[in-house]
Amino acid sequence: MPDPSFYAQQAAQQASRQAQQQAQQAHQQAARAHQQAVRDAAQRGHRPPSTPVRAGHRGRGGGLVPFLLLVVVAVVLARDAALRHSVLGSLDHLLTKVLHR
């Protein structure tokens, strides 16, 4: 009788294959829908739609996640004087090297 971990490994591999197939199908379906939208717009004399905006990359700033990361870094630097001194020293050194090239 095979080891139970063998069955778990087989099930995990099968689930991985199924998830990959579903992702590929979703991608292909989205590509077909985009191509259809481009054709429909061209027939009506409109410009084709722009490429879809990825989540987290809206507008100029980059979205909520980079902003929250920046806030976390600012809070950590504000609370830890030694870390703040080290980071500011490194930035000063880098700026000096860049300006005096």
Image (cartoon, rainbow, N blue to C red):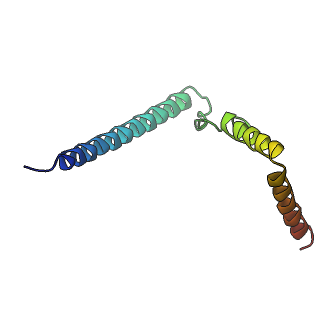
- Which of the 4 quarters of the picture holds residue 66? top right
Q: Which residue is outermost to the left? A: 1
On the image, the x and y values in percent for residue 98 come to 87, 67
On the image, the x and y values in percent for residue 15 come to 28, 41
**Front in this rendered view, residue 42 or 66:** 66
Image label count? 0
Q: Which residue is outermost to the bottom? A: 101
On the image, the x and y values in percent for residue 73 come to 75, 44
For the point 45% across and 38% down, which residue is it?
A: 31
**Front in this rendered view, residue 89 or 17:** 89
Q: Which residue is outermost to the top? A: 44
| Residue 62 visible in the shown view | no
| Residue 36 visible in the shown view | yes
* Quadrant placement of the C terminus: bottom right
For the point 34% across and 37% down, which residue is it?
A: 22
**Front in this rendered view, residue 101 or 93:** 93
**In this rendering, position of residue 20 left or right of residue 87:** left
For the point 56% across and 25% down, which residue is it?
A: 44
**Front in this rendered view, residue 20 or 96:** 96
**Placement of 99 over or under 71, stated as above or below:** below
For the point 44% across and 34% down, which residue is it?
A: 30
On the image, the x and y values in percent for residue 84 come to 83, 52
**In this rendering, position of residue 46 left or right of residue 94:** left
